[in-house]
Image (cartoon, helix red, strand yellow):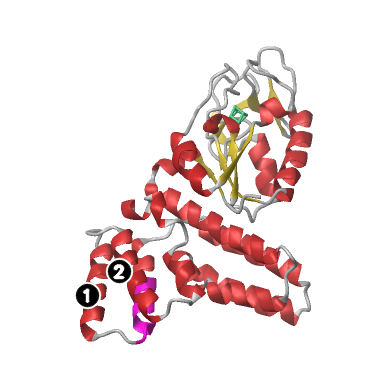
Amino acid sequence: MSSKPKLAVSACLLGKKVRYNGDAAEFRVLNRVWSEHLELIGVCPEVGIGMGVPRPTIRLVKGEERISLVNPKNGEDFTDKMLEYSEIQSDYLMSVGISGFVFKKDSPSCGLERVKVYRGDNPQAVRDGVGMFAKVFTTLYPHIPVIEEGRLTDPLQAEHFLARVHFFSEWQTIGEEGWTAQKIMQFHAEHKLFLLSRAPDVKRTLGRIIAQGFDNDEHPESVALKYMTEAQKGLSVLTKRGRIAHAMERVVGKLPNMTKQDKKEIVEVIHQFRKGLLPRSAAMILLSHHINRNDANNPIHKNFIAPIPMNMGLMARV
Ligand code: SF4
């Protein structure tokens, strides 16, 4: 069995010829780089509801009571089929243990944001919708990290999304045999630097969720789910260089046995990273060198330094 985290992806992005016109919309980095580190699971909701390839184009149409998914040429309505399929497929994906989802932008089924929605006979659409499948998935499972492929062309967004996926995957692995209060507290403690560097306000909220949950005698499974839902909500906002640099300085401050010269050197490299003169990888490699010499087995540092595999090349571009 594969130990790579599983990532669901709109199937056309993986090069599958499942679009309405029989084409694919391959987003190459997924097949070429990401597939080495993640198990990619392709999903095409429109094929899933039996529309076949090629097929007529469909669109979101706002009615009085709900938004529907229809074929504008003949008015055929796919809403109920899509809603039913979406629930079943979302539950299935959760049961196989996905840790994230990359959706195809602009699609009336898969788009996550700014999808065209038509009103009545008006030929002008308003870009304020969410694809029907994506809407059901994110409503049912708000604790799963999601993104559109368009955002992944920005290395900062790609790196941050992958870090969220790995954070989630670890939470999933630890909780596989059931959550206990001890496990939740340990997970939080071991990810405190990671959270500090990416979503410092949420780190405090998460501490409160844990404390209140146990004060109120909540079941650990429920506390763990609330924890991850809130964590991913906070992590959905991109982090800043300054936050990462601040967390790096905290690590330097706590490492034992550093000479004055070592400290001076590394603080200077972090400073250059903060100013955008050096990539994150330069500071991280130097920092991990000192961590390995001084405090190698501390998971707090590992989770902060290597939230995603360094050989994906993203750290050198952010
Ligand atoms: S965007 Fe979604 S529904 Fe459309 S072809 Fe790609 S996977 Fe299928």
User: Residue 286's mark?
Assistant: 2
Quadrant that contains the C terminus: bottom left
Give the left or right position of residue 166, taking residue 240 as reference.
right
The one of 35 and 9 positioned closer to us in this rendering: 35
Residue at 49 percent of width and 74 percent of height: 300
Give SS at disc 2: helix
The one of 94 and 137 positioned closer to us in this rendering: 94
Q: Is mark 1 within 8 Å of ligand 1?
A: no
Relative image position of residue 3 (x, y in whole percent): 60, 54
Residue 176 position by quadrant = bottom right
- Mark 1 sits on what residue? 265
Relative image position of residue 184 (x, y in whole percent): 66, 73
The segment highlighted magenta reads 246-256
Q: Which residue occupies the extreme front position in the image?
A: 1
Relative image position of residue 25 (x, y in whole percent): 50, 27
Q: Which residue occupies the extreme top position in the image?
A: 74
Between the residue at mark 2 and the residue at mark 1, the CA separation in whole angstroms equals: 9 Å
Please report whichever mark, 2 or 1, sits nearer to the chain's N-terminal start.
1
Mark 2 closeness class: few <14, some 14–19, many ≥20 residues within 10 Å? some
Residue type at mark 1: give it: Glu
Magenta stretch: helix, strand or loop mostly: helix
Residue at 52 percent of width and 59 percent of height: 235
